């Protein structure tokens, strides 16, 4: 039994190392000099650590513009998603209205729509609404998700009706009840939702690719992808340094709020 | 008056639902309708530019675009490529996530840290992951070929080989997704009653028998869900291809979504692109319905 556990531990750690290898390689290579990065066989640790790759690529790509754009898109989208979706989740969970069941079935049905189907019509509709090549076009259309409605509804279902009725008897209006009783009770669920939605919007590539045209509007993933395709001038060590910079925000968010993140994903996937 | 009010339900409910109703209606339901209408029409990009928001110009061509898609050599090629991707991606991810979930479910030293390690690739964007893998699998100076040459194998030029480009994309997608599916299996494992294993121990069952008669059957429902999710993932591979290979070499990594994207945004063939995207949609719906049927039959 003891030896079996040791073998299993070794296997587990080995697989862990294999999983970590690409990320290790990314960090290490981002610190190599331009000449060392092209050497074969590659060095497993940089001979001289070149920190200057980071400020250089930051300047070269005007990365602060892309970072600002990514923040300007992600933060409002996430705030609106949390607000609008939990409002809808509340209505579906605790309210009675015409066509509620039909709408709910329709909502479930939309989960099967492949993103590719939406690409072309979204481009057309967003352009017609005058939001092409603007950050607003990446915020408003994506400020409600079906996943978020289901997710918040599940948690609101657990809030006892008596509690909401008691508030009503005390003269609390519907909106007052929603913001002072329901929202605070949802805190753990909303934390998870915020993290999931932040990662999703931060990493989003296809819609920005279709909807943005001018370079000063580009978000991080778009900037990164187009820079790498235009391989004329930039050495790989710098491309990878830019890559590290782009994933630091989500990595920090994940590592600091891991528990809520994982709990949220589980609740969303297994029940659904 | 009162009966109308009762029929309508709570007036405030409409206010709560309003933002979601407008946004999902405009940016999810309408696009689905727009696509189906466009797939039956011959739309010129110029007329589209002049059209109003709720107007889909062009004359009706019936099922022409669908027939053309099914007879299109490149579309068939894309379907085959997508299958090739799935054949590599689905079994590896499924097997990998079950094995990792079983390992992580044990109280081995350092298990929590390793669990996070498995999950990190999932939060990395496809763009970042693609760039990392382009670099790792570089034919001349990549780490993978360096490691292979250590054991005397000279590795191919992965991403410029018609045989190997797709497997590299699939492996990257496995790397990104295994951690997520591991978590799904982990929650399944934790729902299996412990006494079942105790009974098996008393009966003297081997580890393999325990897996075959206890673990695997009780993970059945989850496995079905996982297979469906993996199939749907396989049908949506776009970003990876766009960044890593651009569909090449020799069309060997063109997937269905990539082809649709090219048709729509490179050649402005709106009707054909919409028809192809609907064919994809139909496949996803069929897969989902079959899954629902199987789950219901099995679990009554």
Image (tube, coloured by chain):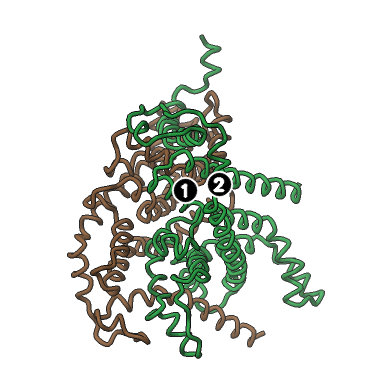
Mark 1, other Cα within 10 Å: few <14 / some 14–19 / many ≥20: many
Quarter holding residue A32: bottom left
Q: Mark 2 highlights which residue?
A: B280
Question: Going by the image, does B220 lie left or right of A238?
Answer: right
Question: Going by the image, does A208 lie left or right of A162?
Answer: left
Query: Considering depth in this image, is A29 or A228 the residue closer to the camera?
Result: A228
Query: Considering depth in this image, is B216 or A183 the residue closer to the camera?
Result: B216
Marking on residue B260: 1
For residue A44, say whether it is visible: no
**Tags 2 and 1 in contact by the CB under 8 Å rule?**
yes
Examine the rendered structure and indicate whether residue B30 appears above or below residue A229.
Answer: above
Query: What is the CA distance from the residue labelled 2 to the residue labelled 1?
Result: 10 Å
Relative image position of residue B5 (x, y in whole percent): 51, 15
What residue is at 52 percent from the left and 77 percent from the top? A15
Quarter holding residue B66: top right
Relative image position of residue A182 (x, y in whole percent): 44, 39
Secondary-structure class at tag 1: helix
Callout 2 and callout 1 share a chain = yes
Question: Going by the image, does A208 lie left or right of A196?
Answer: left
Examine the rendered structure and indicate whether residue A161 appears above or below residue A147.
Answer: above
Quadrant where the image shows the N terminus of chain A: bottom right
Return the chain for callout 1. Answer: B
Q: Earlier in the sequence, mark 2 or mark 1?
A: 1
Colour that chain B carries in the picture: green
Q: Which chain is brown?
A: A
Query: Considering depth in this image, is B254 or A154 the residue closer to the camera?
Result: B254
Secondary-structure class at tag 2: helix
Query: Considering depth in this image, is A87 or B208 the residue closer to the camera?
Result: B208
């Amino acid at each position: 039994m003891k030896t079996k556990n040791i073998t299993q531990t070794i296997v587990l750690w080995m697989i862990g190392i294999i999983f970590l290898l690409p990320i290790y390689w990314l960090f290490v290579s981002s610190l190599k000099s331009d000449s060392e990065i092209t050497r074969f066989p590659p060095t497993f640790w940089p001979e001289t650590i070149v920190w200057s790759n980071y400020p250089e690529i930051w300047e070269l790509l005007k990365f602060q513009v892309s970072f600002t754009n990514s923040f300007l898109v992600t933060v409002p989208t996430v705030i609106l998603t949390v607000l609008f979706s939990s409002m809808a989740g509340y209505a579906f969970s605790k309210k009675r209205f015409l066509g509620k069941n039909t709408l709910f079935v329709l909502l479930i049905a939309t989960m099967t729509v492949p993103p590719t189907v939406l690409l072309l019509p979204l481009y057309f509709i967003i352009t017609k609404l005058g939001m092409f090549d603007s950050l607003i076009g990446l915020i408003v259309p994506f400020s409600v998700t079906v996943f978020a409605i289901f997710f918040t509804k599940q948690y609101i279902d657990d809030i006892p009706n008596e509690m909401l009725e008691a508030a009503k008897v005390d003269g609390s209006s519907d909106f007052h009840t929603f913001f002072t009783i329901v929202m605070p009770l949802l805190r753990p669920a909303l934390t998870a939702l915020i993290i999931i939605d932040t990662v999703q919007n931060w990493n989003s590539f296809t819609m920005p690719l279709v909807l943005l045209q001018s370079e000063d509007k580009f978000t991080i993933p778009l900037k990164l992808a187009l820079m790498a395709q235009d391989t004329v001038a930039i050495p790989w060590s710098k491309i990878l340094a830019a890559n590290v910079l782009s994933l630091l925000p989500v990595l920090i968010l994940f590592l600091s709020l891991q528990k809520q993140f994982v709990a949220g994903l589980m609740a969303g996937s297994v029940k659904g | 008056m009162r009966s109308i009010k009762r029929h309508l339900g709570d007036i405030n409910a409409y206010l709560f639902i309003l933002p979601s109703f407008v946004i999902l209606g405009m940016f999810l339901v309408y696009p689905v309708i727009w696509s189906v209408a466009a797939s039956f029409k011959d739309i010129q990009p110029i007329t589209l530019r002049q059209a109003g928001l709720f107007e889909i110009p062009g004359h009706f061509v019936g099922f022409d675009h669908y027939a053309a898609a099914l007879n299109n050599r490149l579309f068939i090629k894309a379907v085959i490529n997508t299958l090739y991707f799935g054949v590599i991606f689905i079994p590896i991810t499924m097997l990998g996530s079950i094995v990792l979930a079983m390992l992580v479910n044990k109280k081995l030293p350092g298990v929590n840290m390793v669990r996070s390690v498995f999950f990190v690739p999932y939060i990395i964007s496809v763009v970042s992951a693609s760039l990392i893998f382009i670099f790792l699998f570089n034919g001349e100076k990549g780490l993978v070929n360096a490691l292979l040459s250590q054991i005397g194998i000279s590795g191919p030029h992965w991403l410029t080989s018609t045989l190997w480009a797709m497997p590299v994309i699939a492996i990257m997608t496995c790397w990104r997704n295994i951690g997520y599916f591991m978590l799904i299996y982990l929650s399944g494992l934790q729902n299996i009653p412990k006494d079942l294993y105790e009974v098996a121990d008393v009966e003297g069952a081997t580890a393999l028998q325990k897996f075959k008669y206890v673990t695997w059957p009780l993970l059945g429902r989850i496995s079905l869900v996982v297979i469906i999710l993996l199939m749907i993932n396989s049908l949506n591979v776009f970003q990876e291809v766009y960044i890593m290979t651009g569909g090449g070499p020799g069309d060997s990594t063109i997937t269905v979504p990539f082809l649709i994207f090219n048709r729509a945004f490179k050649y402005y063939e709106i009707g054909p692109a919409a028809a192809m995207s609907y064919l994809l949609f139909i496949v996803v719906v069929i897969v989902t319905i079959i899954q629902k049927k199987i789950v219901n039959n099995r679990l009554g």
